[in-house]
Amino acid sequence: MLLRLAPWVLITLLTAPLTAGLVMVLLPAFGYLPVLGGDTFHLEAWQSLWARAGLHRSILLSYFSGLITTLVALFIVVLFLAASQGTWLDRAIRRMVSPLLAIPHAAVAFGLAFLIAPSGLLVRWLSPGVTGWERPPDLLIVNDPLGLALMAGLVLKEVPFLLLMSLAALAQLHPERRVTLARSLGYAPGIAWLKSVFPALYPLIRLPVYAVIAYATSVVDMALILGPTLPPTLSVSIITWFNDPDLNRRFMASAGAVLQLGVTLAALLTWWLGEQAVKRLSQRWLVNGSRSSGSLAIALGGRALLLTTTLLAISALAGLVLFSVAGFWRFPDALPGTFTLDHWQRILPSVTTPLFNTLSIGLSATLIAAVLVVATLEHAARHHLPARRAQWLLYLPLIVPQVAFLFGLVVAAESIGIRPQWALVVAAHLLFVVPYLYLSLSEAYRRLDPRWVQVALSLGVPPWRAFWQVRLPLLLAPLLTACAVSLAVSIGQYLPTLLLGGGRVPTITTEAVAMASGGNRRLIAVLALLQALLPFIGFSLALLVPRLVWAKRRQMRGVT
């Protein structure tokens, strides 16, 4: 009975808040919000919105940052897979992709800012020998008006996500067979992969690609750290209006949230039109018989681009470590003159509550999501339901911009008398934790050989006991890895925590982003490292616990 209800609970959890949020952001956008005296429908909020200086530039920044980020990230992932499938580099990156994905967006943004700033690590490492600079150059790199730093930060985060989704989808396609067949016809390895595997792969990763577009067009935390300021991106402007002491700005903020939804939909429509164009234009190339043209560029470019992205992400984290323990550090010295733990000692006593909130919210959301997802997958396995049935529902919270429905959720909660609180933040995190946990675990669940459970059942073991004693131990490693990914997703949530917590439930992420405008690199680095350290601990436990459990069962490998 409980297993039968699990899929419906999961669907309700994903769709009901989303629907309520969208409805409750649409009504104030057109003037109707009785709590604030809006008893009639009108367009005053839209008139105020369009009168804002710099609005059109904010719209263009959001629109193009989403499209360019997605295009670059997808290009890097596809070229890498074409160039490195089955190589040692492919195996090494596969082991690194989940930990890289687990690094919170804000931590990556801070690390990249410390890396590329005019007085950042890259300039220090090249000065004065290569650049000749004895002082930091007067260049606007971070917060540049074109949003290039923001796009670079988004690419660093979205490449691991698209790579993980691609690797999960490739398991369904048997790419080795396709490439082997193409190579037997004389095709170079990279060309063989692009012509025989990618056309079948892309439909399987289309929804993750759309999720990247939606996130990149409406991101808030990374835009606050790396994005332009005059004007900012549309999502940052909406946050400013929503938090304005003048409550009448809520109407304009709601109109802005609806506009943000329109910008994201426009970006998705543009991408879809691009898909159709590429599909038509590539038909001739797929069948023209060209077997090696461009293969060298694919081999070199695919490996170099992903290696560069990975090294940048690692260097960004290294920069955080250096700044967190740096004492006196004059420019252009490559390393600090002194090292100190004063910054850690100064900030740790003040982050006890944010640390507790971060862990309690993350663990609670992950535990609830794990129970729902495992119950749903177990129900599907027992009743042999289609693997991809209604999977598009999982991507709804990822494709719909957060600012487009979280504002509505806040209004809905206030309308029924629910004040910002810890439980409300956990519920909001579930919207984003559940999809990641399901997507991380579902493929391993389906790949588990059903004969193990069938043998147990044939011995008279009840289904529930077969689940606990056979299926769950075999799936221990992927389940813990999926939980680690989900915990990392929860730790990195900024906007749901800020809005549904009303500023009363501080976490490490909200504290780090709030300090972004303060300019104290040392303290920011400490907070960003704490934010990155928590997911690292989660992944370490996900690797260590199965080893301990299987220490005396060397022949029991489970599913990895």
Image (cartoon, rainbow, N blue to C red):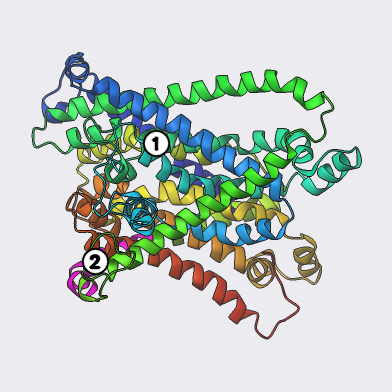
Total numbered labels: 2
Q: Quadrant of the C terminus?
A: bottom right
From the image, state whether disc 2 or disc 1 is nearer to you.
2
Q: Residue at position x 38%, y 24% from top?
A: 263
- Kind of element beneath mark 2: loop
> In the picture shown, does residue 106 fall above or below 141?
below
Image quadrant assignment for residue 465: bottom right
Q: Earlier in the sequence, mark 2 or mark 1?
A: 1
Q: Amino acid at mark 2?
A: Trp
Viewer-nearest residue: 211 or 187:
187
Q: Residue at position x 55%, y 76% from top?
A: 544
**Residue 329, labelled with which disc?**
2
Q: Residue at position x 46%, y 40% from top?
A: 398
* Magenta-drawn segment: 344-363
Image quadrant assignment for residue 44: top left
Q: Is residue 53 left or right of residue 406?
A: left
Viewer-nearest residue: 551 or 529:
529
> In the picture shown, does residue 225 fall above or below 464?
above
Q: Is residue 429 left or right of residue 296?
A: left
Image quadrant assignment for residue 470: bottom right
**Residue 18, labelled with which disc?**
1
Cα distance between the residues tagged 2 and 1: 48 Å
Crowding near the residue tagged with mark 2, few <14, some 14–19, many ≥20 C-alpha atoms within 10 Å: some
Residue 30: give x, y in percent of width and height: 24, 18
Whether residue 297 appears in magenta in the rendering, the answer is no
Residue 422: give x, y in percent of width and height: 26, 56
Residue 84: give x, y in percent of width and height: 70, 50
Whether residue 350 appears in magenta in the rendering, the answer is yes
Q: Overall secondary structure of the magenta stretch? A: helix
Q: Is residue 135 left or right of residue 377?
A: left
